[in-house]
Image (tube, rainbow, N blue to C red):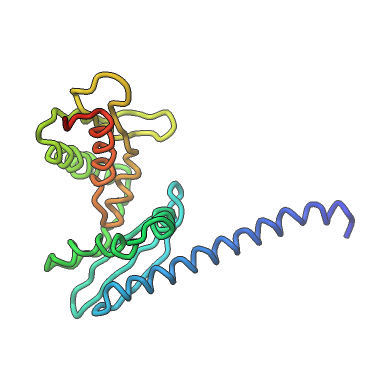
Amino acid sequence: MTEKDIDTQVPVDNEQDQEREQAQIIMTWFQHIQEVMKEQFPEYEVDGQIGNNPTYGPMFAFTLKNDEKSTSCGFFLNEIMRNFQTNPNAGLWLSSFFVDLLRSPENHPLPNPPQSEDDAKELLDKHIVPYCAATVREEFPDQKIYVDLELHEEHGPVLEAGFVAVEDGNNTCALPLQYLMTLYLLNRDPAEPLIQAMYRLYEENNLGQ
């Protein structure tokens, strides 16, 4: 083996080492969160799976089973890491996503992903976008809310929302439709991050005074 061959081999080995290390980190977090779930819901059997989104990275989904009932919910690894590193009540944060689902008598499997662009467009146009718009307006009944679809140079189609009363400065927030779709497919409320962003705008602009 020549020196040149050795030089070209080093980045490959490093890359493989990094991939193995990353896979180990993901598995360690997955096992830790699964144990947290078992502690939070001792009366349920806890199953889990690991996935990867090309845009948002590794994701975990957990399913609680009890008798004939099954309830699933998913999370982004980066939000799990952020919460478990900064939030002293991270276990409660995690379990809160299951509580409302568990109150319902129905099973809650993860939704089936749309099988075509037309299916995805229909899901967004007829369910996710109208739901988010209605939910944001209900959250701020004393305000006129602007909600519309826009095209962002970096993130593609986004759902934009803002307060009509705020004319200057930071007066809108926007989330990619792909992100809202991903939340929906994880059995999460796609309107929640939009509402959180709107509350920040609400406080920044002193609309409650």
Residue 2: image x %, image y %?
89, 56
Relative to residue 137, is residue 171 depicted above or below? above
The residue at the far top in this view is 168
Residue at the spot 44% in from the left edge and 32% down from the top edge: 154
Relative to residue 147, is residue 38 depicted above or below? below
Residue 170: image x %, image y %?
32, 26
Residue at the spot 33% in from the left edge and 71% down from the top edge: 37
Relative to residue 69, is residue 1 depicted above or below? above
Looking at the image, which is closer to me, 205 or 65?
Answer: 205
Quarter-wise, where is residue 156 in the image?
Answer: top left
Quadrant position of the N terminus in the picture: bottom right
Count of number-bearing discs? 0
Quadrant position of the C terminus in the picture: top left
Residue 47: image x %, image y %?
34, 73
Residue at the spot 17% in from the left edge and 61% down from the top edge: 100
Looking at the image, which is closer to me, 67 or 140?
Answer: 140
> Could you tell whether 87 is left or right of 122 in the image?
right
Residue 103: image x %, image y %?
14, 66
The residue at the far right in this view is 2
Relative to residue 146, is residue 22 depicted above or below? below
Residue at the spot 27% in from the left edge and 65% down from the top edge: 95
Looking at the image, which is closer to me, 130 or 102?
Answer: 102
The residue at the far front in this view is 209
